[in-house]
Image (cartoon, helix red, strand yellow):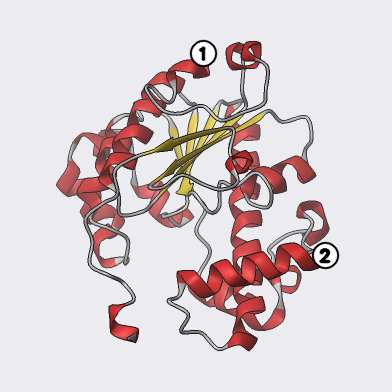
Amino acid sequence: MSSLTNLIGAGVLLTAAPVLALDLPRVDIVILGEVHDNPIHHIKQAEAVTTILPSAVVFEMLTPDQAAQATVDMRSDEAALEAALGWNASGWPDFAMYYPIFEALDDAAIYGAALPRETVRAAVDSGAAAIFPGDPAVFGLSDPVPAAQLDTRKQLQDEAHCNALPAEMLAGMVEAQRLRDAAFAQTALQALRDTGGPVVVITGHGHARKDWGIPAKIALADPQVDIWSVGFVEAALPQAEQFDFIEVTEPAPREDPCAAFR
């Protein structure tokens, strides 16, 4: 695998790891966290995929059935691929933003990690451990979230939903996120077993956090797997240790998503 020093280009490196760690001959899984509607982030993810040459790419945005439609022949035709995936009816930002990633995949296997919406909703009421399709203990879902972390995560959920959710719902939203983190980690590990790696994961940067996101779940399930987490963000973070690398980009132009709640 190529040196990860090329992964971020002119980005800001925020890590306490020795410089030689950047030249590891093999990293099993690279998690590329994005702001979903920022086209710059998807261009950078595509550049990273071109550098890494992964054997498999896991998409948060795709179900397994959708991923099966993204055949190698289909990837050279943006309109046909979008139609096969039903992307623009799925609620994700316009497919044109994401297509550079698919263009960069060559013949890499594509895995869809998205859970059914009803499954995610069930975790809000029942908890991640009760809903997870597998052994929840493997990914730490049987353990309660530490109190301080839970408070932080509830606050983040509140902010992400424009402070419009009932307070009693926030812990359930954290459980839904834990469920998705574990499912994405499970799929990434399956892709690694199937293909030998390296594996790239395309996901929101909240899921790419090392402290409690996909990297933490993978580390619990298989401590022998080498993981690197990259955060493409729009503002400097107070806790840069959330990622191995971080790059701050220009924010995407967007309307205020919380305007309707005021």
Front residue of 258/64: it is: 258
* Rendered residue at 46%/22% (across/down): 52
From this view, report whether residue 201 is shown above or below residue 171: above
Label 1 and label 2: CA atoms lie apart by: 37 Å
* Rendered residue at 64%/75% (across/down): 123
Badge 2 local density, few (<14 within 10 Å), some, or many (20+)?
some
Q: Earlier in the sequence, mark 1 or mark 2?
A: 1
Front residue of 248/39: it is: 248
* Rendered residue at 34%/27% (across/down): 47
Badge 1 local density, few (<14 within 10 Å), some, or many (20+)?
some
Tell me if 24 is positioned left or right of 134 in this view: left
Q: Position of residue 139 (x, y in %)?
A: 76, 53
Classify mark 2: helix, strand or loop. loop
Residue 24 got which mark?
A: none
Q: Taking the image as drawn, is residue 107 in sight? A: no
The residue beneath circle 2 is: 142
Q: Position of residue 190 (x, y in %)?
A: 63, 41
Classify mark 1: helix, strand or loop. loop
Query: Quick check: marks 1 and 2 in contact, CB under 8 Å?
Result: no
From this view, report whether residue 85 is shown above or below residue 179: above
From this view, report whether residue 52 is shown above or below residue 215: above
Tell me if 130 is positioned left or right of 80 in this view: right
From this view, report whether residue 226 is shown above or below residue 122: above
Q: Check the picture and name the quadrant holding the C terminus.
A: bottom left
The answer to which image quadrant residue 72 occupies is: top left
Question: Three-letter amino acid code at disc 2?
Answer: Ser
The answer to which image quadrant residue 141 occupies is: bottom right
* Rendered residue at 66%/70% (across/down): 175
Q: Position of residue 164 (x, y in %)?
A: 46, 84
> Which mark is in front, 1 or 2?
1
The residue beneath circle 1 is: 3
Tell me if 252 is positioned left or right of 63 in this view: left
